[in-house]
Image: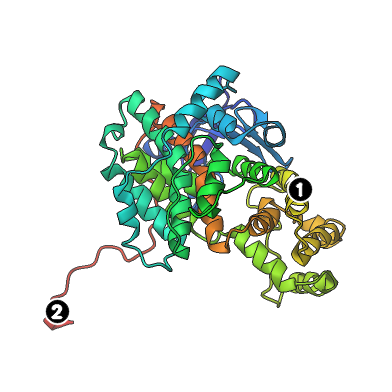
Amino acid sequence: MTDTAKITLGDKTVDSPVLSGTVGPDVVDIRKFYAQTGAFTYDPGFTSTASCESKLTYIDGDEGVLLHRGYAIGDLAEHSSFMEVCYLLLNGELPTAEELEAFDNTITRHTMLHEQLATFYRGFRRDAHPMAVMCGVVGALSAFYHDSTDIQDPHQRMIASHRLIAKMPTIAAMAYKYSVGQPFIYPDNKLSYTGNFLRMTFGVPAEEYEVVPAVERALDRIFILHADHEQNASTSTVRLAGSSGANPFACIAAGIACLWGPAHGGANEAALNMLREIGRPERIPEYIARAKDKDDPFRLMGFGHRVYKNYDPRATVMQKTVREVFDALKVNDPVFEVALQLEEMALNDSYFIEKKLFPNVDFYSGVILSAIGFPTTMFTALFALARTVGWVAQWNEMISDPAQKIGRPRQLYTGPAHRPYVPVDQR
């Protein structure tokens, strides 16, 4: 028997079904609440509202848990590859060796971009932000790939999904190359997904590019850690755009635009800038004191999370990964020492413990990306590259959900009531 929640409003009492997921909080079904009471619910930011049913990703912020299709993010980052995680998110199960090989082959053979898109890039200024370029180019894909825009056709949806995952590294690498005035580098089918991206970004036609295994693995892990994160702002944007029947390329472009916001995708850049501002380990106490001072506008970036009220499970993997990259590239960067000591001091400070301000994934990812050679303007573009598979999987799930309707949030209207119109000569 389904539990019910009794909600009393004035002289009306309604019984609302209580739905239970596999894990996580129960959900009160209020779909009929307006029809039954004539009232809306009010939830700015939708922080207490489930907008959909999903089988993709589960987060327990209090316990620091992140699962993709039931698999812990730490296990996936430690033992899996980004291609394997992509297959898992899209198909629901980890692939067999044969399935992974076939999937990897499919993605590899979709990495080329339509040649006319190279001309499209030249319409941007050289100093355009890579995210501005990404928004424009991804949105324009629907003008080039008409054979995968029928969202009612499962086969076309699959082709569009594969194309987006495959072409995003090429799009991002070309955005970088365009910004530095270097020629575009075509994909190389002999390389892995991540190795190919590194070559397209940092390779030049004049010489062979050698992929450093530790760097390739580190970037692959970063992609895994950013692949999906439940119903965040950009994912909700993709679902909302998709609910109108928009084509998949337009939906993902909408997600990229949302991710661009500094409160969402730009946190790792902010964390790196903060570490650079601190500069030396001996200055850490000064900045911790400033962070505690309510009258000081300074904030410690990369600590705390909207969802996680415990240690971000992705940060544990990042801490190990950053050491591997620095050792492989023989980087001697004081920023890394600042990061390590700041983390240690914060984790042992009662102020941070009480407020549950633990390091999150952005605390380390910016340091790693900078060590690899990416400018800070590319950080969010890399986030978009990795998150594309999550957006695509969420979009596919939404299209296949019979309960899905076009998104139409309600509002609490506080403007003027009806007023008579006054002609301009009488005002």
Q: Give the residue drawn at x 58%, y 21%.
A: 95
**Image x and y of residue 225, in percent:** 63, 42
* Residue sitting nearer the eye, 197 or 29: 197
Residue type indicated by callout 1: Glu
Return the mark for residue 302. Answer: none
Residue type indicated by callout 2: Val
**Image x and y of residue 152, in percent:** 30, 27
In this rendering, does residue 106 appear at all? Answer: yes
Pick whichever of labels 2 and 1 is earlier in the sequence.
1
From the viewer's perspective, is 166 left or right of 48? left
**Image x and y of residue 169, in percent:** 48, 45
From the viewer's perspective, is 358 left or right of 267? right
* Residue sitting nearer the eye, 225 or 240: 225
Return the mark for residue 424. Answer: 2
Q: What element does badge 2 sit on?
A: helix
**Image x and y of residue 41, in percent:** 47, 46
Q: Give the residue drawn at x 46%, y 58%.
A: 177
Q: What element does badge 1 sit on?
A: helix
Q: Which of marks 2 and 1 is in front?
A: 1
Q: Is residue 54 above or below residue 427?
A: above
From the viewer's perspective, is 377 left or right of 137? right
